[in-house]
Image (cartoon, grey):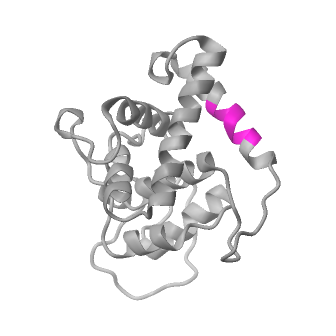
Amino acid sequence: MDRREAIKRTVLLTGAALSASTITAVLNGCQAEASTATAWAPKFFDAQQAAALSEIAETILPATETPGAKDVGVPEFIDQLAATCLPEEEQMSLRDSIEQIEAQAQSKHNKTFTGLDSEERLALLNTIDAEARSIETVPDDMGETAWSGFLKLKQLVLLGYFTSEKVGTEVTAFLPIPGQYKPCIPYEEGQPAWTY
């Protein structure tokens, strides 16, 4: 999938604009890499935040017949992006979002987010998502809309997923050597979207 197309899809799925620094980072080559959990040493997040981030990402995009967020390296992508590309304000927003999710897990279930079962994780993130979307947004000094930190985190999960090579070649339809451009082609039921 073309990175510009991945950015468009992420914006459409979350209903929020990506920050300029995030777009620049992705267009300049920061992308998710399929990895093994034992090989990842977080660069920006501490071990507890990285574990929570992994489970948050996997709750948003779980493994089914398609790979999940952890399978394609989304937590590593977000960690790399935060460590090397994001301004300090956005870095702190990511950390704060993870800490707020942990705080809500503690207050509602008396457990860390990683200690919750999958249904509790999903219910908690759905509640946080609904609350974040209900908050009225106000344009900031740069004319961009100020979204909650959770929605920005969710955007990064989606962006990391859709820019990963594994999703681009195995989940969406992929033609490595393109032929003639055909803007209108018949749709066959069950056919996955094309990687552009």
Residue 88 image-quadrant placement: bottom left
What residue is shown at x 49% (from left), y 19% (from top)? 112
> Which residue is drawn at the image coordinates 62% and 33% (left, top)?
125
Q: Is 69 positioned to the left or the right of 137 in the image?
A: left
Residue 2 shows in this picture: no
Q: Residue furthest bottom?
A: 180
Q: Which residues are magenta?
A: 125-131
On the image, the x and y values in percent for residue 8 come to 56, 70
Q: Is residue 108 above or below residue 135?
A: above
Write down the quadrant of residue 162 in the picture. bottom left
Left or right for 148, reference 70: right
Quadrant that contains the C terminus? bottom left
- Residue 101 lies, in percent from the top left, at 57, 32
Q: Is residue 107 visible?
A: yes
On the image, the x and y values in percent for residue 155 come to 55, 55
Q: Residue at x 52, y 21 (%)?
A: 118
Q: Quadrant of the N terminus?
A: bottom left
Residue 129 falls inside the magenta stretch: yes
As drawn, the residue found furthest toward the left would be: 39
Q: Residue at the spot x=78%, y=63% of the render?
A: 138
Q: Is residue 196 magenta?
A: no
